[in-house]
Image (cartoon, rainbow, N blue to C red):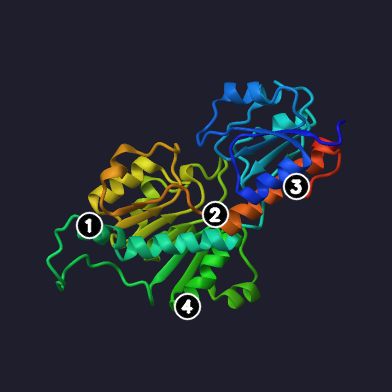
Amino acid sequence: MSSRPKIFLTRQLPSESMQLLKSQSELTYNHDDRYLSKEEIIAEIQGVDGLLCLLTDTIDDDVLGANPDLKVVANFAVGFNNIDVAAATARGIPVTNTPGVLTDTTADMAWALLLAAGRRVVEGDRFVRSRQWQGWGPLQFLGGDVTGSTLGLIGFGRIAQAVARRARGFDMKILYWNRTRLSADEESKLGVQYASMDDVLAKSDFVSVHVALNDQTRHLIGPRELSLMKSTASIINTARGPIIDEAAMVDALKNGSIASAGLDVYENEPQLEPELYDLANVVIAPHLGSATIGTRTKMGNMAAENCLAACRGQVPPNLVNPESLD
C-alpha cells in the first residue's frame, strides 16, 4: 500500500477537514455542491482505498462491489442507515461514523424549532416582510406558552437528554418514552418522568422526536399517534424524517388536530410532502441539526481520521461493524 492512501470524498467538508485529508492522502472529491448519483460514485471509487461519504449518499451492495479493494466506508454522520452495513461486513469492509460530536448542536436546533413553531416566529417574520403589519394587536399570532408547559420526548438518548436539560430552564414538566427506562436515580437527576408513548403524546404541549430510524421506528408516529396529541400541541423532529408519517402529519396540521410542527428532517429528502411548502403552521429547515462551523469541523475531522486509519490497516476509532475485521 502507498504511504498516502487514495480517498474519494463525495462532497466538500469544512476547510480544516479538507486540509487534513489533502495532507495525508491522495484525495479526489466532488467539487460541486450537489448530490452524486450512484453511478457517479461507482465511477469515482475505482482504484481508491477509502470512500468518505455523507448520509445523503446511498452506499448499497452495488457500490460496495464496484471496487473489490475498498478498505473502508467512512460516513460523515452519526447515523449510517444510508449504508448497507450487512453487505459491507460480508465483504470485509469496515464502516465508520461520527458519534458524540453533535449532541448539543442538535439539541439547540430542536429548541430553535420548538420556540419558532410554538411562538409562531416564522409566520410573524413572513407577515412583517410582506409589509402587511400595521402595528401591535392583542390577538396577533397568538402561540402557546413554553415556560411551565409539558415537553414530551420520544426516545431518550444523548440528544433527547440534552433537550431535557435545556427544558429545565423553562420550568417544564418533562415526560419521556424510551424502549429502555432509566433508573429512578437517573430520572431524578434529569428531572424527567417516564410514561407510555401514548401518554407522552396525549399529555405534552410539545413533542420532540429522538429515536433512531430502523424497521421498527419507520412511521412510528402515524395517524393514530397524531390523533392522540392535543390540538394545541407542536411536534418537533430533528431525528430522521421517516419516523413520522409525513402525509399523516400534513393532514393533522391542515385539520387542526395539532397546532404546529418544527421540522429539520423529511421522509424523502430533499423532497417534502408538497403541501408542507404552503402550510403556515410548520417551520421547515433544511437539515441544519449539526450545522455549526465547530460541529461540522469536528465531524469532518473525525470522519477523515476514521478513513485514514482504516486505509492504513489500523482499526478505525469509530467502527460500527467490528465483525468486518474477523
Label 4 Cα crowd, 10 Å radius (few <14 / some 14-19 / many 20+): few
- What x and y, as percent, mark residue 46? 71, 22
Mark 3 in CB contact with mark 1 (< 8 angstroms): no
Q: Which mark is residue 169?
A: 4
Q: Which mark is residue 129?
A: 1
The amino acid marked with disc number 1 is Arg
**Alpha-carbon span between mark 2 and mark 4:** 22 Å
Q: Quadrant of the N terminus?
A: top right
Instruction: Decide if residue 267 is on the left or right side of residue 324.
Output: left
The amino acid marked with disc number 2 is Ser
- Front of the two marks 1 and 2: 1
- Which of pointers 1 and 4 lies earlier in the amino acid sequence? 1
Residue at disc 2, secondary structure: loop
**Alpha-carbon span between mark 3 and mark 1:** 45 Å
Q: What residue sits right under mark 2 in the picture?
A: 290
- What x and y, as percent, mark residue 49? 77, 31
The amino acid marked with disc number 3 is Glu
| Residue 319 makes an appearance in the image | no
Residue at disc 3, secondary structure: helix
Q: What residue sits right under mark 3 in the picture?
A: 305
Q: Residue drawn 58% across and 74% down?
A: 190
Q: Quadrant of the C terminus?
A: top right
The amino acid marked with disc number 4 is Gly
Q: Which mark is residue 247?
A: none
